Image (spheres, rainbow, N blue to C red):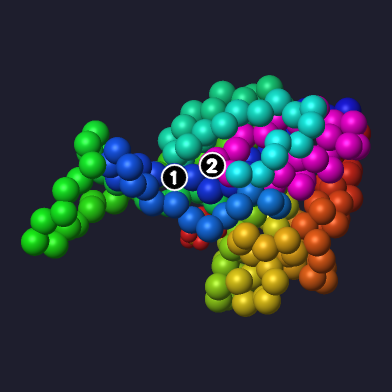
Amino acid sequence: MARILVTAGPTYERIDAVRFIGNRSSGKMGYAIAAELESRGHEVTLVSGPSSLPIPKNLHVHRVESAQEMYDTVMQLWPNVDGAIKTAAVADYTPKIVADHKIKKKEAKLTIELIPTMDILTAMGREKREDQWLVGFALETDNALAYAKDKLKRKNLDYIVLNSLADAGAGFNVDTNKITVIDRDQNVTTFGLKPKSEVAQDICEIIQPFLR
Ligand code: CTP
């Protein structure tokens, strides 16, 4: 039995008391992977951004909102797990200043200054021990394979799972996905379009060598 950390869903970056910057991630892929790993007898901790999905049973769950909260939670958990699968769609930028009131409408244009968030996966890759493994996700629109291979190396991952937005029925907020998996030796495995529950099974099979 392995101890596995799964991150899922979007992050919300607050602009003011009522508004945020988010993305269309539903959390479906990460929740499906967490449920599949649990059903195979592993101890799963799910760190989830805002999602309306029901929490699969028997998981340790941490709900977070922003990229910074996800970073803090994940980095605290990371030393105590055997491996992690990072499906979360983490915001790359966050507002520099968060208004504590609701920003009022004015005649002049409004500019929101954004600053980069911490890259959680990169930080995890940097701190990864010999006995740990790390799987990242990548969503690309063009040059998908080249970018994904570069991300795998840069972030010190064992596998990267690529979803291409070019594939109908794949990606955010749908029940199906079509993935391509790349390993450290640059071997590329392509899967067909299928329900996310079956994609989760494929991913579990791929990481099986780590799970003993
Ligand atoms: N990721 C992360 N922390 C961030 C941004 C991304 O941990 N602040 C992780 C995601 O969880 C995912 C992987 O990095 O597993 C790839 O995310 P993606 O948005 O495709 O890549 P980026 O590194 O943000 O690069 P780019 O925007 O240039 O494609």
Q: Is residue 31 above or below residue 145?
A: above
Q: Residues within 10 Å of mark 2 (few under 14, many from 20)?
A: some
Q: Kindly report the distance in space between the C-alpha atoms of the residues bearing marks 2 and 1.
A: 7 Å
- Asked if disc 1 is less than 8 Å from ligand 1, the answer is no
Question: What is the span of residues highlighted in magenta in the rendered image?
Answer: 30-51
40 or 126: nearer the viewer: 40
Q: Are marks 2 and 1 in contact (CB under 8 Å)?
A: yes
What element does badge 2 sit on?
A: loop
Q: Residues within 10 Å of mark 1 (few under 14, many from 20)?
A: many
Lateral position of residue 78 relative to residue 66, left or right: right
Confirm whether the magenta stretch covers residue 18: no
Residue, disc 2: 50
Q: Visible in this render: residue 71?
A: no
Residue, disc 1: 12
55 or 194: nearer the viewer: 55
Confirm whether the magenta stretch covers residue 44: yes
Q: Visible in this render: residue 141?
A: yes
What residue do we see at 61% from left, 52% from top?
Answer: 26
From the image, which quarter does the C terminus lie in? top right
